[in-house]
Image: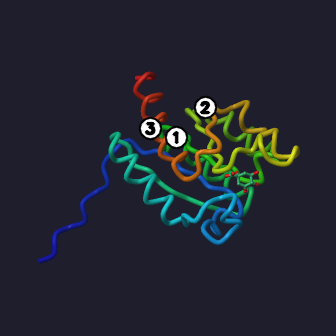
Amino acid sequence: MPNPPVPPTGVPVLVLNGPNLSLLGLREPEVYGTHTLADVDELCRSTAAAHGLRADCRQSNHEGVLIDAIHEARTAHRGIVINPAGYSHTSVAVRDALAAVELPVVEVHLSNIHRREAFRHHSHVSAVADTVICGAGAHGYALALTHLAQLLEDNR
Ligand code: DQA
């Protein structure tokens, strides 16, 4: 008889990626690098596991779906790593959702948004994030999860 599936272990954290990040690897590789979203998800899961966390990786191109995932995290997860992508610069609603759930939040951007067009310099999310990491490429997600583990440890 096959063994029953092993339940995933680790403290659950949400890794949420916003619009157009499904095209990572293909999309402007000179800006965002050649890693695919699947590569980033794998990096997140392995980094999380190394710190006793379990990364639940999701991506959506829809603002409401991202907001629903943040609401769900209130009871399902202990912290959030988010790359809100284009919604960083436009969405008061994503910002409000993050403020509402009162979880530790680490905001990530692959590119250094401060070295790019002026409209990218302001993120509505940064005001409600504990930490912002930008310009480190895909490695930024590993930094974010390592830091989130530390925040959760500090809050225990
Ligand atoms: C991004 C930066 C945003 O300005 C842009 O809209 C994205 C990706 C980044 O990861 O560098 O889609 O969040």
Looking at the rendered structure, the secondary structure element under dot 1 is helix
Which is nearer the eye, 101 or 50? Answer: 50
- Residue that badge 1 annotates: 144
Amino acid type of the residue tagged 3 in the rendering:
Thr
Which is nearer the eye, 50 or 153? Answer: 50
Mark 2 residue's CB less than 8 Å from ligand 1: no
Cα separation between marks 2 and 3: 12 Å
Looking at the rendered structure, the secondary structure element under dot 3 is helix
Query: Could you tell which of marks 1 and 2 lies nearer the N-terminus?
Result: 2
Cα separation between marks 3 and 1: 5 Å
Mark 3 residue's CB less than 8 Å from ligand 1: no
To which quarter of the image does residue 50 belong?
A: top left
Looking at the rendered structure, the secondary structure element under dot 2 is strand
For the point 71% across and 66% down, the residue is 28
To which quarter of the image does residue 99 belong?
A: top right
The x, y position of residue 19, in whole percent, is: 71, 61
- Residue that badge 2 annotates: 131
Amino acid type of the residue tagged 1 in the rendering:
Ala
- Residue that badge 3 annotates: 146
Cα separation between marks 1 and 2: 8 Å
Query: Could you tell which of marks 2 and 3 lies nearer the N-terminus?
Result: 2
**Quarter of the rendering occupied by the N terminus:** bottom left
Callout 1–callout 2 Cβ contact below 8 Å: yes
Callout 3–callout 1 Cβ contact below 8 Å: yes
Q: Residue furthest bottom?
A: 1
**Quarter of the rendering occupied by the C terminus:** top left
Q: Residues within 10 Å of mark 2 (few under 14, many from 20)?
A: some
For the point 48% across and 59% down, the residue is 41
Q: In the rendered view, does 112 fall on the left or right side of 130?
A: right
Q: Residue furthest right?
A: 118
Amino acid type of the residue tagged 2 in the rendering:
Thr
The x, y position of residue 78, in whole percent, is: 47, 38
